[in-house]
Amino acid sequence: MKSDPVGISTSRMIELSREESLALLAGVPMGRVGFTSQALPVIRPVNHLVDGDTIVIRTHTGSALMHHTSLDEVMVYEADHLDPLTQTGWSVMVTGRARLITEPLQADRYRDLLIAWIDRDLDEIIGIQTELVTGYRLNR
């Protein structure tokens, strides 16, 4: 952060409402999902969509992420948009239980809406409930 001559920051963090946080998250196409694997934290970049109170992502059958959805595991999802030149931006983090979406019509709908960014079969659909939503904006 840029500082004035006496070392006081000229930027400030503003806490965002749940609604504003989810709207910002819905406005970007990708973020990072965090979970544990073999008792260690793992973070993977993925594209997503926001559907009400659910963050929807796609994965493949053999993925480490897929293994943890059967356990109703708590996961975290984070996305941000930061500008290093102006030192402004925002960051949103969602924490909640992940579940495999298996209902055929719902899963097909998500496959149509959420186009995979990588050249791989990503047939599994995971929904992360937005149980805890925190967001911050960095303003000058």
Image: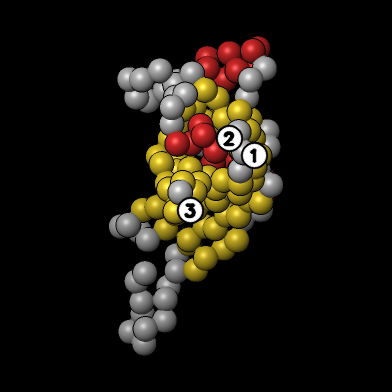
Q: Residue at x 32, y 57 (%)?
A: 84
Residue wearing tag 1? 72
- Please say whether residue 51 is visible from this viewpoint: yes
Q: Which amino acid type is shown beneath numbered disc 2?
A: Thr
Are there few (<14), some (14-19), or many (20+) residues within 10 Å of tag 3? few
The furthest residue to the bottom: 6
Left or right: residue 43 compared with residue 109: left
Q: Secondary structure at mark 3?
A: loop
Residue 112 image point, x, y percent: 52, 14
The image's mark for residue 69 is: 2
Are there few (<14), some (14-19), or many (20+) residues within 10 Å of tag 1? few
For the C terminus, the quadrant is bottom left
Badge nearest the viewer, 3 or 2: 3
Q: Residue at x 52, y 65 (%)?
A: 13
| Pointer 1 with pointer 2, Cβ within 8 A | yes
In whole angstroms, how far apart are the C-alphas of marks 3 and 1? 16 Å
Residue 20 image point, x, y percent: 62, 47
**Image vertical order of residue 9 relative to residue 108, above or below:** below
Q: Residue at x 49, y 18 (%)?
A: 123
Q: Secondary structure at mark 2?
A: helix
The image's mark for residue 39 is: 3
